Amino acid sequence: MNKCAIITAFLGETRNRYMVYQDNRGLAEKFAMLSRIPGADGVELCYPTDFENPAELAELLKRHGVGVAGINFRSRRTGKWWRGSFISAQAQERREVVDDLKRAMDLAAELGCRRITTCPLNDGADTLFEVDYIQAYEDAAATFGAACAHNRDVRICIEYKKSDPIARCIFGTAGETAAFCLLTGAPNLGATLDIGHALYAEERPAQSAALLAKAGRLFYVHLNDNDGRWDWDMLPGAFHLWEFVELFYTLRKLGYDNDWYGFDVYPKELDTVENFAASITLTRKLEAITDRIDIPTMEQLLRERNSAKTLPYLYSLL
């Protein structure tokens, strides 16, 4: 069974462009909240914010006895890298990203998690003829390649997303991300499959998982849900019950069943502890539905490809 990690950023300030829902919290308060979330096994730490006081972080991890699923490297930051981090036209900015990413990789290795996830949201373009795509992919390959070469035992995961805040990110789909990772040739460069991002890109998450795994690049999974129109970071199963069941069934076939789920769920004005507790409860419920699938029966149904048989069978599980 996969363990459940909470992204520390979502234990702090929640806001949108119009209002602040909840004020920011210190690291100690975030860990105290984490300890009150039933079923939470660990955290996905955020770099650089969570590492401002390494001694405090080490003490909190030890005191609460939680695991670290990975480090979320913030590749978009206030005051810098506005025109992309990995594809910045400024060589100095790209070197800065590589150096900072190497520091994060060293910290990940020290913590024993050996996984970096990053969402390059500013790496793309708003309008046509804004970016030289050929040069952008060359720069991105060189930048990621240099970072990956620093420590092959630490995996770097690109959390792809179609847009936000850039109108079109260059890593927008599972296919684009898999192709890019293969292009670089770095064995430790792969993808974070964020279910909400896949749905927003009009993907079927199980298919995305299969493609990434076949390319050898399914490194991490983020759970959340949305209505397909925007990345709302809602509770798993809020809109896509059967998509989650199909995903979990497929992940088990692919061998992603003794790893971590990172919960990328935004509580907004709701009680944060209650919201993440519900996220984990719903995930385990969706897994329980998946458990009811008789594997030989489903494999036969998959071979037959007859929805008049498959859908009634699935609904018989409820």
Image (spheres, helix red, strand yellow):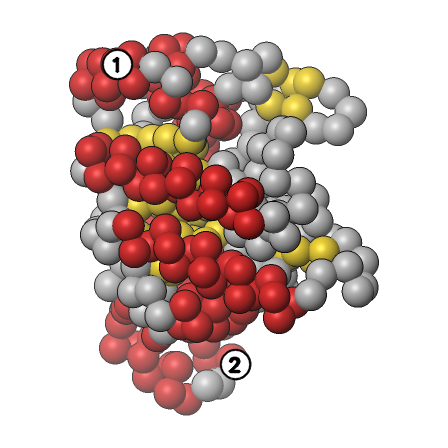
Check disc 2 and report the residue beneath it. Answer: 308
| Depth check, front residue: 8 or 180 | 180
Q: Identify the element where label 2 is drawn.
A: helix
Image quarter of the C terminus: bottom left
Q: Position of residue 124 (x, y in %)?
A: 66, 56
Q: Which mark is residue 55?
A: 1
Determine the residue positioned at 62% across, 34% down.
Answer: 80
Determine the residue positioned at 46% across, 80% down.
Answer: 309
Which residue occupies the extreme bottom position in the image?
A: 304
Q: Looking at the image, is mark 1 or mark 2 earlier in the sequence? A: 1
**For the residue carrying disc 2, how many other residues have a C-alpha within 10 Å: few (<14), some (14-19), or many (20+)?**
few
Three-letter amino acid code of the residue under disc 2: Ala
Determine the residue positioned at 46% across, 86% down.
Answer: 305
Answer whether residue 130 is visible to the viewer in this image. yes
161 to the left or right of 254: right
82 to the left or right of 38: right
